[in-house]
Amino acid sequence: MVTRAVAIFFHVLSAWLFYGLARRLLLREWEVLLATLIFVALPISAFFGRMMNHEVMALPATLLLVRGYWECVRGGWTSARWIAAVGVGCLWTAFSGWGGFFAIGACALHAGWEATFRHNRRAPRVLVVLLVAGSVLLALDTAHLVWVLDGDVTYLRELLESRMGIESSYGGARWLGRIVELHWRYFSLTSAVALVVLAYLAATGLSADEPRDVAVEVGSIFLLAGIGYVTVFNLSAPQHDYWQFMLLPASALALVLAFRWLVTMMKQSQRRTAWLALLIFISLEITATASITLTQRHTRSEGYCLEIVEQLRRDWL
């Protein structure tokens, strides 16, 4: 009960921070409410949001970090406020799990683009904070691991190689198929398509002097962090259903942007019935996917889980 309560606390905090971010990024109240509903209702959130994995602890920190970073480069907060948000976010997410460093890196890459190509005078300041904080925290994490392992760097290197799949023959096509399968199961197929569109819109908008759509821009930061985590630790990603947990904010924003586009097309196009049918279809696909996945996860027992629990009771309790 205590373990689940801790996980739920962190995930409720994530939902609250995401709601605040959605209010900052989205244009209409219904978009904010829909984004928050999607954030909490997708199976990756509704099921794994109460499981004690380090991604659950890192996600609210990532949301705080990205919010502080974005308010800095867009000039929305005072220096003291964004420095506090970015500093606490970096410290929190880096000490929660390796996924946090991908969020720091994604913000740093975006800040570098803002400073170099958009000539944003606020970007170099936050870029320095991100690079210094990320480097120091990575060094501290690594030093702590080496200390715990009594200086056995070889074990740490072999563990990293195994997680990255350097010695694996999993196969690119099989790996990608498994990743898409897991995303479909826990996010929906519509989410997979929406994330591809989000990546395209973000890439085509990089040349603009200002972000064409702030939701696309911020969503792409979360997308870059989540994809980086899945790609680098590619051997673990197809083995663990929750490995795409860090993609949750990007997915929620991408799906709302898809709904916004469909509603706009339905209002402007002469083929309103066709657009309405498509809107209903993707709504049903998301709902059906979530319902089926959650039903399966709550009604089927898993042999691996039962075996490990019995092993823990026998050896440790």
Image (cartoon, rainbow, N blue to C red):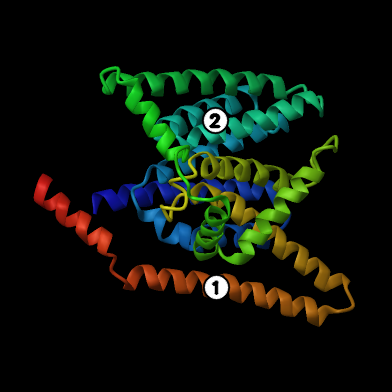
The label on residue 85 is 2
Residue at image coords 77%, 21%: 121
Q: Position of residue 169 (x, y in %)?
A: 47, 47
Are the two marked residues, 1 and 2, in contact with CB atoms closer than 8 angstroms?
A: no
**Quarter where residue 29 is shown:** bottom right
x and y percentages locating residue 130 in the rendered image: 58, 24
Which residue, given by chain and number where applicable, does mark 1 sit on?
287
Residue in view at x 36 percent, y 27 percent: 156
Residue 27 image offset from top left, x and y in percent: 73, 54
For this orientation, the residue located farthest to the bottom is 273
Observer-nearest residue: 127 or 34?
A: 127
Q: Secondary structure at mark 1?
A: helix
Distance between mark 1 and mark 2 Cα atoms: 35 Å
Decide: few, some or many residues near mark 2? Use Cα within 10 Å; few <14, some 14-19, many ≥20: many
Under mark 2, the amino acid is Ala
Position of residue 156 relative to residue 265, above or below, is above
Q: Which quadrant of the view contains residue 65?
A: top right
Q: Is residue 212 left or right of residue 159?
A: right
Question: Which image quadrant for residue 286?
Answer: bottom right
> What residue is rendered at 53% in x and 53% in y?
175
Q: Residue at x 35, y 53 (%)?
A: 51
- Relative to residue 285, is residue 217 depicted above or below? above
Q: Does label 1 or label 2 sit earlier along the sequence?
A: 2
